[in-house]
Image (cartoon, grey):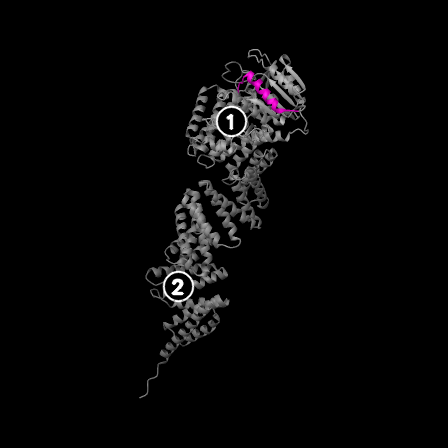
Amino acid sequence: MGGMSEPEPARGLRRGTELLLEAVALMAAAERDGDYSVADRAAALLRQALAITPEGAPQRLHHLSALGRVYRDQFRHLGRRAALQAAIDAHRGSLASTPPGDPQRAFRLFNLATVLSDRYELLDDVAALDESIRLLDEAVLADAGGAPLPVPARINLGQRLRDRWHRRGDPTDLDRAVEVLAAAADPGAALMYAMVITERYTERRTPADLDAAIEANRAAVAVAGSLPKDLADLADLARIGLAALLGQRYEDSHAPADLDGAIFAYRTAVDAAAGADRAGLRRALGGLLASRYELHRHRGDLTESLRLLRTAVAATDEPVTRALLLRDLGHVLHRHHTGLLGLDTLRECHDLLAEAERLLPAGHPERPHLLRDLGEARRELADAAGEPELLEPAVATLRAAVAAAADSPLLPQSLSNLGVALQALFAHTQDLATLTEAVAVLRRALEAAPPGHPDRLLVLTNYGAALNRRVDLAVEGMTDATPKAGGPARIGADGHPPPPELERDAQTAVTLLREAAELARHEADEERAPVVHILALALLLRHQLTGDLADVDESVDLLRDVRAALPPFPPDGHRLYIDALAPTATLPEGSSWPRLWWCPTGLLTLLPLHAAAPMEGRDGVLDRVVPSYTASLRALRRARDAAPAGGGPITSALVVGMPRTPGLADLPAVAREEGVVRRYLPQVTSLTGPAATPQAVLAALPRQPVVHLCCHGTQRLDAPTEGRLVLSGGPLQVRDLWRPAGTAAALAVLSACETVRGGAALADEALTLGTAFQLAGFRHVIGALWSISDALAAQLSAEFYARLAVPGGIDPERAAPALHHAVRRLRAVLPGRPDLWAGYVHIGP
């Protein structure tokens, strides 16, 4: 009996399955070998399988799905765009015949959604995007019901939801993307989740999203080694994202662990990056290292920060990127120039920022920061280098910074910086309109920094200081040249009370600075102290207007509290400073001594800083250096520039003497001091007794290279410009010597009381009779900090001029070492009486 023949339908199903398996094997080899030319053969086999498989047979759906995948490979790997639509049609046909609840439905939803996603990416077909998301949403729900949906479906859904959020801005799409990807346990999903949660944090800035984004990026970095090569770029993004997010959380919370983590993450990212990407990473890492240096003061962090930024600058030619790198490098140098090379670093900072300003286009969001830093660098350079010509450019730059920051959070700080620069310009020009503008600008800054604003402390302090300066100038102009005994309760040259606007300024300054001091209570003591000092000055100025002694008491209490809060001076701390002046002990006679210039301000002008020494009697400043004083670096530079052109000895001098002054003690040694001067200078003009009037002295000064004054003198602490020498017929005051006389002179010896004693009311420079003579053109000035002995003054004069003597006259360029020698000789005779020898000082180069 012959065998039964196989029915035609059964034979078609079997043969179709064989063709399917052959096609699947071909595509597996293609994926393994990368040779997709076999896709045409696979597609033909599957079309043949469909042709012989009966309609309604479930195998047809498998053939359609496989054919759709082959068409997609033709699109992706062979570049056949028409194959994409064929793939969509095949998958759509397969899905259409797969009812809900079928175990294969989730897979077929995913397949169709994937090729629709391809169509969206190819043609920007938004309808295809929407359908893809709808299908993937259904696939995820089917997966939740138990179907074994592959993880790529969640990744695809999260990515498409993210795409639609970017297009339409619907926050529900972003939230759904976060939700879908958070539930996918897969390295690829971890990378995509890190991306979308980071974007949601960037969009909403919530602390919870920041924490979640950090953990997501950290997890993505941890699995980066197991990812395929096509996801390497996403792994690099995760490293950079982790670093940036940790840096952001440090800015928010100031947790040192976040700063350390960000630095570690950026270092890893720099090592993994290549080409232009490294410049931006070096920029970010350099900034964070600078922040950690400010936190811990580890020198290596600052060194590495500067190295990274310099390397990035050197490797970058693109104008905007280079400008940003120059700005960051200049910013770090600006903040820390005093701990680097000082003035040289400040000059480098200025040049870098100036180049950045030329490169960065107008309207760039970083331009307000750049202009602020450049303006501040110019202002500081003007002061540190004694170059007041930089003040006008500094003000112009800071005006531009204010304009650029008009709508940004940087406005209060920019206005405050402009106000400070205008004050510095006023100090140089004495143009009251400039000071008035400074006050107006700082008032605007205060309006832009309401309570709670991070810059309010800075603005309050600078505004209060500007008002103090305006009140101080007004008080100085109103005060009598010779106050009456006891002084009036309220000042005024004509006995009338001060104008209301002056009292208003004084009251406003106190109010602002009280608030600033309260805010500063939460700052470090070193940062709080300057604020309290400015408040104390405001109280003293208000006392001068009102006569209210409570202001004086409060000022004293504030200063005592600040001093008590500061860390105690180390028991052996003086050695740090004295040893820094000169490393060796007392030098032998004839050796070249090191030089040191003191530049005290405010109350420090009252102290004999040059006489500092250990309490137990070991070597002090006078045993290490030749000390001098200067009112400012600018004044010292001016004195140096005024060096006499000729090299010969000085042969002439003016001697001014007041052996008798009504109401004051006689000075019998005047004649001895004049004799000393005549011993060493052959041409001496003498104005003594009734001939020594202020008018005669001022008229004679421009014609003399040397002046020696022997008379009484005094200094007012509350009004330094009223310090005076008592001459015949009236005083010679600081204000009389305020402007330069126009001629360079060599030496002024002020053998009188308190001729270099400063005042408490001036915070910038030590304004005394001695410094006034220096400003009037005398290159070297000798004076006294306090009342001195008439007899000892004559003895010191003899020692001093003997050291100046050269054949034919004297050499005033020896003034500093000559006084140093004379004071040390006097100290040797009276070692326990610094009140008799420590008061003599040299001002000049």
Corner quadrant of residue 356: top right
Whether residue 318 appears in magenta in the rendering, the answer is: no
**Residue 508 placement (x, y as % from top left):** 48, 27
**Residue 844 placement (x, y as % from top left):** 59, 27
User: Residue at 46% across / 50% down in the picture?
Assistant: 266
Label number found at residue 609:
1
Q: Tell me, yes or no, if residue 59 can be seen here.
A: yes
Tell me how far mark 1 sits from mark 2, CA to CA.
Answer: 87 Å
Corner quadrant of residue 554: top left
Q: Quadrant of the C terminus?
A: top right
Q: What is the three-letter code of the residue carrying label 1?
A: Leu
User: Residue at 48% across / 21% down in the picture?
Assistant: 832
In this rendering, the answer to whether 169 lies above or below 89 is: above
Answer few, some or many: residues within 10 Å of disc 2's Cα (few below 14, many 20 plus, some between 14 and 19).
Answer: many
Looking at this view, name the residue that lies furthest to the bottom.
1
Please tell me which residue lies in front, 806 or 268.
806
Label number found at residue 109:
2
Answer few, some or many: residues within 10 Å of disc 1's Cα (few below 14, many 20 plus, some between 14 and 19).
Answer: many
The answer to which of marks 1 and 2 sits earlier in the sequence is: 2
Q: What is the three-letter code of the residue carrying label 2?
A: Leu
Please tell me which residue lies in front, 59 or 754.
754
In this rendering, the answer to whether 655 lies above or below 460 is: above
What segment carries the magenta color?
Answer: 786-806
Name the mark nearer the viewer: 1 or 2.
1
Q: Give SS at disc 1.
A: helix
Q: How many marks?
A: 2
**Residue 314 placement (x, y as % from top left):** 56, 49
Q: Give SS at disc 2.
A: helix
In this rendering, the answer to whether 215 lies above or below 779 is: below
Q: Main secondary structure of the magenta part?
A: helix
Q: Tell me, yes or no, if residue 163 can be seen here.
A: no
